[in-house]
């Protein structure tokens, strides 16, 4: 006897194969079972999906047999499948694309025999429950109140805590209370960046490994090897791992005992996937918590405006409970948060990069044995190489963008398609030998700081040491960890970097942070740019003066210097007083007047084609056809326009914004519109269209 099974396999949304496929099996397999199935001429991994056999549509379908079952692995649970189904529907992606992309790459490649061998490997020794958990830091009154609120209420919670207020200790305390209360409970702790997981894992291992074993804490992020990711996933799926620390991908981790989800730095844009299924891990965390009865704690010193809006009083429609920790741990009452100083660059000489006042402040700090952090969110030596004679600029031949000049290896490198060439000896257009860099990146700042600090000596008489941390300097495996260790060890006096150094790091000797040229985001066409800039500057400022004992011993104070041409801008006024609530209120009032999120709901449809005309034509045709759909009057569709970077790797890109005051109306329209998009793509006039994708709740417009 053969049983019909519904199996989801990995297929992109634009392929038209969005639901489960039908296969035959000699035995009935429970939903969630992982199987190997034939798909076309290849064999792939699939997940048995909960569709009743009588509900399968098999008319005209050739049913192929299942090739193998990954026995020995417990089926994926109903809660996990509900999460995947919701993400698939909400973000307008195929079911199999979401389900299979959330599984470890190595698991997708293993056959039944290979998996069986993998599962036979010896496991770590069982922990000793009698071993006491090492004592953490004594909680402050604010931390104790927050922990009490977590215990007493269901949430979701938004923890609004100043930088340095001890949010991590609250996370540790909440996890410890959970594990001691329930021997089978699991906790998911999410961070926005890969480089933040090692230091967090170190703290969790120190707290929990003595009692629950080193295997109780696992990491999950794309920087791990396939074998490491599989090992962590299996530990979480089996319940052996009690805590999973991960980036956005970890929201799909199979955790049968999940009872607590923590999203640190919840405002960070990194939680939104920008390729494939464009999901928001933060939003899915809230959904998953509601579905599985797990408490959800979102933490940030600068919450996203959406989360801040949702945490308003319940009488005003708020859905989250706001928890407050405004005081830094260990900071004296009169010290607290770092002082913010604004330098009016209009009063500096033309072309000034570092104002004399800032240079003097940095030299004084280094001479006293303190560290300085210089922040510029642009890597490379200079954004453009140009010729003064003919106006040539280092444009990328494959993208509508400039290639960035990297002086260390003397290359021009496109940060969009990766095209790299050696720097020409002369202008390619006119032959002028005097081609020069235009603008500044972190490489150039590092070089200039080396000159400015050349005569500055540390307390031990040694010259000041400059280091740079960005995506270029940390390409090699282990480079980031090595450089961070040097900073923590006091081997670096001035640290130059991009946003990589502004988030989450606990540099105890840093007392001065300087932001160079932050003005670009003040007048961006992206309505979220001011929010991102304020969060980034607040996070960067939070690196200064974190160690109260060190600051007191140095008779110093934490400072944030901002060099700007608009020192009286409201954003910098709010930054000076660390007044996030005032900034958020002003931004939300502007958005409400303009009908922007969170007071409306958006989706972007992006199209890629050989020509811009085909890309825009496809979107406009689909928009016109969508006007006939039920409820289309509740959804406003803008005309198609080129994307900001409209050409990447010789592919033209266009987008269309869709907006509605009702989330439900937008979702209903998008669900119906999928068939229209597929039909429109098949029209002969759209030959040359490569792919299209829907991005629900986009962050980049």
Image: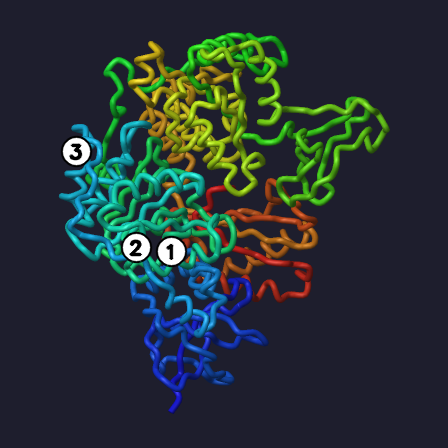
Q: Are marks 2 and 3 in contact (CB under 8 Å)?
A: no
For label 3, the crowd category at 10 Å Cα-Cα, with few meaning under 14, some 14 to 19 and many 20 or more, is: some
Q: Quadrant of residue 135?
A: top left
The reply to whether callout 1 and callout 2 are in contact (CB within 8 Å) is yes
Judging depth in this view, the residue of 471 and 91 nearest the camera is: 471
Does label 1 or label 3 sit earlier along the sequence?
Answer: 3
Residue drawn at (45%, 15%) of the image: 568
Q: Residue 474: where, in percent of width, then height?
A: 54, 37
Above/below status of 295 relative to 626? above
Residue closer to the observer: 693 or 383: 383
Distance between the Cα atoms at labels 1 and 3?
32 Å
Mark 2 Cα within 10 Å, few/some/many (few <14, many 20+)? many
Task: Identify the disc placed on residue 144.
Answer: 3
Q: Earlier in the sequence, mark 1 or mark 2?
A: 1
| Distance from the alpha carbon under mark 1 to that under mark 2 | 8 Å
- Secondary structure of the residue carrying numbered label 3: helix
- The label shown at residue 241 is 2
Label 2 to label 3: alpha-carbon separation = 27 Å
Residue 90 on image: x %, y %: 40, 57
Residue 523 percent coordinates (x, y): 52, 27
- Would residue 77 appear left or right of 384 to someone viewing this image? left
Q: Residue at x 43, y 49 (%)?
A: 221
Q: Is 534 left or right of 144, judged from the image as shown?
A: right
Quick check: can you spot residue 462? yes
The residue drawn where x is 67% and y is 48% is: 649
| Residue 567 vertical position relative to residue 188 in the rendered view, above or below | above
Q: Secondary structure at mark 2?
A: loop
Residue 116: which quarter of the image?
A: bottom left
Q: Secondary structure beneath disc 1?
A: helix
Look at 27% across and 43% down and name the residue there.
Answer: 297
Between circles 2 and 3, the one closer to the viewer is 2
């Amino acid at each position: 006897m053969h049983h019909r099974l519904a199996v989801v396999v990995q297929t992109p949304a634009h392929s038209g194969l969005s639901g489960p496929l039908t296969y035959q099996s000699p035995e009935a397999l429970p939903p969630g079972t992982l199987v190997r199935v034939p798909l076309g001429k290849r064999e792939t991994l699939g997940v048995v999906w909960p569709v009743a056999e009588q509900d399968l549509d098999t008319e005209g379908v050739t049913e192929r047999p299942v090739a193998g079952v990954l026995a020995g692995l417990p089926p994926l649970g109903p809660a996990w499948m509900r999460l995947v189904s919701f993400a698939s529907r909400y973000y307008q992606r195929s079911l199999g694309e979401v389900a299979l992309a959330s599984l470890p790459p190595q698991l997708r490649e293993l056959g039944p025999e290979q998996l069986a061998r993998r599962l036979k490997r010896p496991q770590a020794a069982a922990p000793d429950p009698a071993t006491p958990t090492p004592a953490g830091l004594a909680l402050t009154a604010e931390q104790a109140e927050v922990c009490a609120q977590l215990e007493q209420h269901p949430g979701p919670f938004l923890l609004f805590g100043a930088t340095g207020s001890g949010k991590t200790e609250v996370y540790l305390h909440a996890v410890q209370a959970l594990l001691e209360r329930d021997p089978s409970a699991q906790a998911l702790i999410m961070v926005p960046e890969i480089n933040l997981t090692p230091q967090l894992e170190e703290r969790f291992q120190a707290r929990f490994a003595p009692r629950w074993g080193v295997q109780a804490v696992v990491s999950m992020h794309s920087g791990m090897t396939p074998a490491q990711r599989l090992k962590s996933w299996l530990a979480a799926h089996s319940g052996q791992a009690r805590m999973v620390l991960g980036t956005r991908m970890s929201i799909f981790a199979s955790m049968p005992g999940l009872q607590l989800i923590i999203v640190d730095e919840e405002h960070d844009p990194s939680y939104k996937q920008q390729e494939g299924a464009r999901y928001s891990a933060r939003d899915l965390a809230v959904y998953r918590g509601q579905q599985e009865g797990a408490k959800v704690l979102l933490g940030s010193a600068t919450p996203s405006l959406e989360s801040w809006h949702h945490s308003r009083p319940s009488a005003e429609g708020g859905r989250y409970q706001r928890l407050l920790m405004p005081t830094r741990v260990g900071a004296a009452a009169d010290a607290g948060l770092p002082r913010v100083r604004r330098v009016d660059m209009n009063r500096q000489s033309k072309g000034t990069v570092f104002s004399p006042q800032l240079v003097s402040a940095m030299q004084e700090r280094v001479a006293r044995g303190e560290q300085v952090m210089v922040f510029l969110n642009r890597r490379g030596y200079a954004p453009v190489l140009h010729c003064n004679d003919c106006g040539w600029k280092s444009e990328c031949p494959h993208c509508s963008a400039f290639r960035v000049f990297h002086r260390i290896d003397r290359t021009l490198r496109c940060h969009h398609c990766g095209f790299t060439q050696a720097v020409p000896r002369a202008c390619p257009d006119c032959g002028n030998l005097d081609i020069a860099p235009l603008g500044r990146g972190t490489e150039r700042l590092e070089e200039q700081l080396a000159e400015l600090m050349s005569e500055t000596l540390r307390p031990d008489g040694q010259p000041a040491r400059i280091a740079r941390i960005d995506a270029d300097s940390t390409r090699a495996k282990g480079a980031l960890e090595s450089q961070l260790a040097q900073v923590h060890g006091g081997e670096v006096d001035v640290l130059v970097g991009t946003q990589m150094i502004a988030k989450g790091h606990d540099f105890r000797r840093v007392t001065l942070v300087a932001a160079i040229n932050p003005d670009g985001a003040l007048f961006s066409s992206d309505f979220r740019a001011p929010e991102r800039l304020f969060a980034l500057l607040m996070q960067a400022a939070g690196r200064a003066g974190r160690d109260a004992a060190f600051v007191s011993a140095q008779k110093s104070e934490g400072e944030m210097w901002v060099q700007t041409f608009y020192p009286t801008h409201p954003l910098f006024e709010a930054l000076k007083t660390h007044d996030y609530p005032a900034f958020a209120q002003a931004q939300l009032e502007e958005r409400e007047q303009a009908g922007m999120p969170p007071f409306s709901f958006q989706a972007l449809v992006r199209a890629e084609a050989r020509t811009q005309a085909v890309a825009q034509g496809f979107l406009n045709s689909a928009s016109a056809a969508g006007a006939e759909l039920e409820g289309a009057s509740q959804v406003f569709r803008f005309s198609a326009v080129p994307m900001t970077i409209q050409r990447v790797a010789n592919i033209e890109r266009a987008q269309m914004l869709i907006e509605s005051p009702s989330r439900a109306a937008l979702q209903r329209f998008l669900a119906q519109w999928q068939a229209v998009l597929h039909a429109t793509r098949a029209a002969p006039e759209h030959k040359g269209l490569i792919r299209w994708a829907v991005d629900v709740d986009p962050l980049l417009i």
